[in-house]
Amino acid sequence: MSKRTCAACDYELDDTAIQVRIGGAVVEVCCDECATKLKATSPHF
Ligand SMILES: [Zn+2]
């Protein structure tokens, strides 16, 4: 759990990670494009 990765593309995250709330859970992605992609593919959103 020491390394954070993008929830959409598994890219390693740094301090510029974007937090996205999906169905009550908060996940982190590397960029706004991945945030949009994650929301589009989440059945719970
Ligand atoms: Zn990503």
Image (cartoon, rainbow, N blue to C red):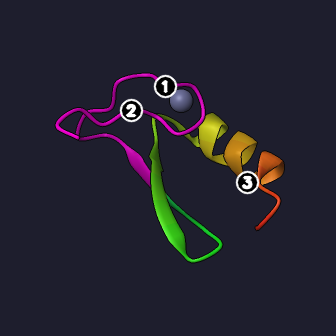
Name above or below for residue 43 compared with residue 7.
below
Name the residue nearer the viewer: 2 or 32: 2
Q: Residue furthest front?
A: 1
Q: Which residue is mark 1?
A: 10
Q: Are the residues tagged 2 and 3 within 8 Å (C-beta)?
A: no
Answer yes or no: disc 1 within 8 Å of ligand 1. Answer: yes
- Going by the numbered disc 1, the residue's amino acid type is Asp
- Going by the numbered disc 3, the residue's amino acid type is Lys
Q: Could you tell me what secondary structure mostly forms the magenta stretch?
A: loop
Q: Quadrant of residue 15?
A: top left
Q: Is residue 4 left or right of residue 20?
A: left
Q: Quadrant of residue 17?
A: top left
2 falls in the magenta region: yes
Q: Is residue 39 left or right of residue 29?
A: right
Which of pointers 3 and 1 indicates the residue nearer the eye?
1
User: Marks 1 and 2, Cα distance to the nearest angstrom?
Assistant: 5 Å
- Considering only order in the chain, which callout, 3 or 2, is on the residue closer to the N terminus? 2
Within 10 angstroms of label 1, few (less than 14), some, or many (20 or more) residues?
Answer: few
Label 1: state its secondary structure.
Answer: loop
Q: Is residue 16 left or right of residue 2?
A: right
- Going by the numbered disc 2, the residue's amino acid type is Thr
Label 3: state its secondary structure.
Answer: helix
Label 2: state its secondary structure.
Answer: loop
Magenta region, residue range: 1-19
- Considering only order in the chain, which callout, 1 or 3, is on the residue closer to the N terminus? 1
User: Marks 2 and 3, Cα distance to the nearest angstrom?
Assistant: 17 Å
Q: Are the residues tagged 3 and 1 within 8 Å (C-beta)?
A: no
